Structures are given as structure tokens and as C-alpha cells.
Image (spheres, grey):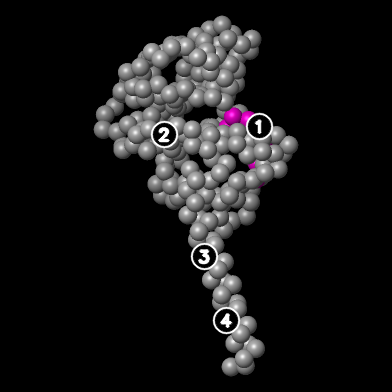
Amino acid sequence: MNPIHQSFRILFCTVTLLASCRFACISQIQVRDEPKHRPVMENKFIRILDVWIKGGDSCKFHLHNTPSLFVYLSSARVRTQVQGEQPVEQKVEPGQTWYNSFSEKPLVHRAWVRDVTSLHAIDIELLGELPFSHSEYLTASGLTLLQDSTRHRTYRFELPPGTRLQLQAKEYPVIIIPYKGDGDISDQEGRSDLYQGQFHWMDKQGSMELKNKGEGRMEGYVYEIKQ
């Protein structure tokens, strides 16, 4: 073989190998280790990641392989790319929520914000084992069941100004996240503010009262975590 051709072939193989190693390393970054996905709470049931990406900025490729709940808390134009596929652009709005078990196919992707506004979202990873019991649905004025899976239930609440949401957790713990409006919340730990984009964790067998203290409608979700 011509020495020049042999050198070129070795160089090409080396570059290809390095690129493949980089691709493999990128795909192994767990979402909890991605800098824009900041862990803010973890217990035996869940890990909550507070996601902030500034306008014009992006996050790294990262791996989702744990059952997860997601909710957008801001409005922005976002371009997402699944690894190995073409980017897709979408407009996200506060209150968009979904669940993915990632049981059939883990997800490796990245996102960047094509807007001047920042993207704010919350990713709730469900860490516990599958439940062996069944609890009655939560019932309260202003609360509507949206989804019931093997791992969670999603309820939506709407509170006109000055009204209250009273909840009694039963078999499962819950997370309350408002995506519109501000309130204050009372439980066995005391009273505290609960602003748009924040979350409140309540253990099973607990109770709480959420009051809309603003002038407009308060809206959000109650996620019941089946464990």
C-alpha cells in the first residue's frame, strides 16, 4: 500500500474512532448530571430537576431512562433534537405536561431556546418501585383528574381569586405545581408562599390547604405519585 494512502487511512480511522467515542460518551450523560437540569429535591420516591435554559442558550445531549413527569412553566420557542435525528422546533406554553415511562426506548436529546425568553420546566423522575396497592382518587372542589397511569395520576386545579383547594393525601404522596398565579399553602409543617413555577411536596397521609391570593385565576397540577 502507498505510504501516503496508509497514513491517510490510519488518520481517518483514528478520527472516526474518536468521534464514535465522543458520541458514546455524550449519550451516557444522565439528565441529572446535565448542568441546565438542576436537582433540587430527592427522596426514595422522586428526584425533582429544575430546568432553566436562557434565551439563545442550549443544554447538552443527555439521557432519560427513568419514568418521568414533565411540565413547562414558561413560554418559549424551543428546538429539540433526538440524537441521530434532525432538530424539531416548537412553541411551548406554561401548563403543557406529559408523562413518559421510557420503558420501551430511553431518550437521548438536547434542546436550545430560539427566543429571548428563558425556558423553565420541571422534570420529576419517579424512583420508587411499582405500587402494589390501589388508592381512591383525590377529590376536592376545583380538582379534575387528567391522567391515570401505573406510576402516577395527574390532576388539574383551577382556583378563582380568594378560593381554596383542600387536599387529603391517602395512599400516595403528592406534588403540587402552579403554572399560573400565586398562592399560599398550609400543611402540618406550617404556612408558606407557593408562587408560579414552584413546587410543594406532601407525604402520604398528609393534608394541605392552598389559597389563591392573587387577583387572577390560579392554575396548576397535583401529581399523585404511586409508590
Quadrant where the C terminus is found in the figure? top left
Q: Name the residue tied to disc 4.
A: 10
Q: Secondary structure at mark 3?
A: helix
Q: Cβ–Cβ below 8 Å for labels 2 and 3? A: no
User: Which amino acid is tagged 3?
Assistant: Cys
**Spatial distance from mark 4 to mark 3, Cα to Cα?**
16 Å
Instruction: Pinpoint residue 82: horizontal percent, then vertical percent.
Output: 56, 52
Magenta span includes 23: no
Q: Name the residue tied to disc 3.
A: 21
**Spatial distance from mark 1 to mark 3, Cα to Cα?**
36 Å
User: 167 above or below 41?
Assistant: above
**Label drawn at residue 75:** 1
Q: Earlier in the sequence, mark 4 or mark 3?
A: 4
Question: Bounds of the magenta span?
Answer: 72-79
Q: Secondary structure at mark 2?
A: strand
Q: Secondary structure at mark 1?
A: loop
